[in-house]
Amino acid sequence: MPLSTRNKAILEALLVTLLWSSSIILIKKYLLDVPPLAFTGMRYALAFLFLLPGLIRRKGEVRQLRAKDWRYLVILGLVYYTITQGAQFLSLVYLDAITMSLLLNFTGPMVALLGLFFLKESVSRLQWIGMSVFLIGVAIYFFPITTMPKSLLGVGLALLTMTANSIAAVMGRGVNREQRLDPMVVTGISMGIGAAVLLGVGLAIHGIPTFEPRVWFLLFLIGGLNTALAFWLWNRTQQVLTATESSVINNSMLIHISILSWLFLGESLSPIGLIGLLVSIAGVFLVSWKPA
């Protein structure tokens, strides 16, 4: 039985979150000694180069972009890539990763409210229940090992990351659901703009980094597969999935990272943590499920 367009989009979105999660595992395992901001800037700049042939093939559509489209894509690129990625990097300087991850999981409800107001996308009772179940699972997973954050600056930067990510999610859904612009055009232009600023900041702080061949290999792998392909697929799924659905599926990275860390990094998963993940999975299912 062939998959419906919606179910295909859900599977593609889950594949994207798996790719993004594997990036974190690769960085944690092999790239801890690499300047993170410079690496991030080069990652997105390289991803743009992978997308460039697709943009060239669609140069006719690029020429037809209106001034309004360019303004929208410029803002999307700055919010989605420069601000979100930059603030996330800075927040991890002042805040532990556990608290950071916990705060980012509140993106779903914020996107639901923004989407309700700006996109007029209603959120069903079942989806509100699903988001609540997901957050309960997150609380079960994190709270036994989470302490009070010691840095108000770190919390502020994490909240900035969450806010920017939420705004970008709504903006991405807004431009993609019209299906007027090709997802390759949306991805390539917005990423190119955001990557240019991010790379400039990274080089200004760290200078021109010297990478070993192993780092270059991982940079090409993450830039091509986990960034260029993943963000193109993500923009394509946003033509079908609502902002709320995309956001909660994005938050399922918590589940992927926990499982991948257990498999490849040897990190243990407590029974309580496993229960939290299972509850979170149930929440993601409820948000994505459309009863007949």
Image (cartoon, rainbow, N blue to C red):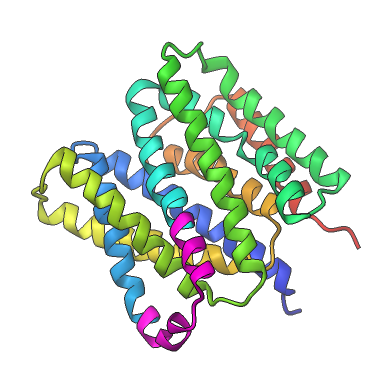
Q: Which quadrant of the view contains residue 140?
A: top right
* Residue situated in front as seen by the camera: 7 or 71: 71
Q: Residue furthest right?
A: 292
Residue ID at (49%, 23%): 99
Q: Is residue 82 above or below residue 154?
A: below
* Residue situated in front as seen by the camera: 9 or 214: 9
Q: Is residue 43 above or below residue 108?
A: below
Residue 269 appears at what percent x and percent y?
51, 29
Residue 207 appears at what percent x and percent y?
11, 44
Quadrant location of the C terminus in the rendered image: bottom right
Q: Which quadrant of the view contains residue 217?
A: bottom left
Q: Is residue 166 above or below residue 241?
A: above
Give the magenta part as a residue range.
55-75
Magenta stretch: helix, strand or loop mostly: helix
* Magenta stretch: includes residue 122: no
Position of 39 compared to 228: left or right?
Answer: left
Residue ID at (28%, 57%): 196
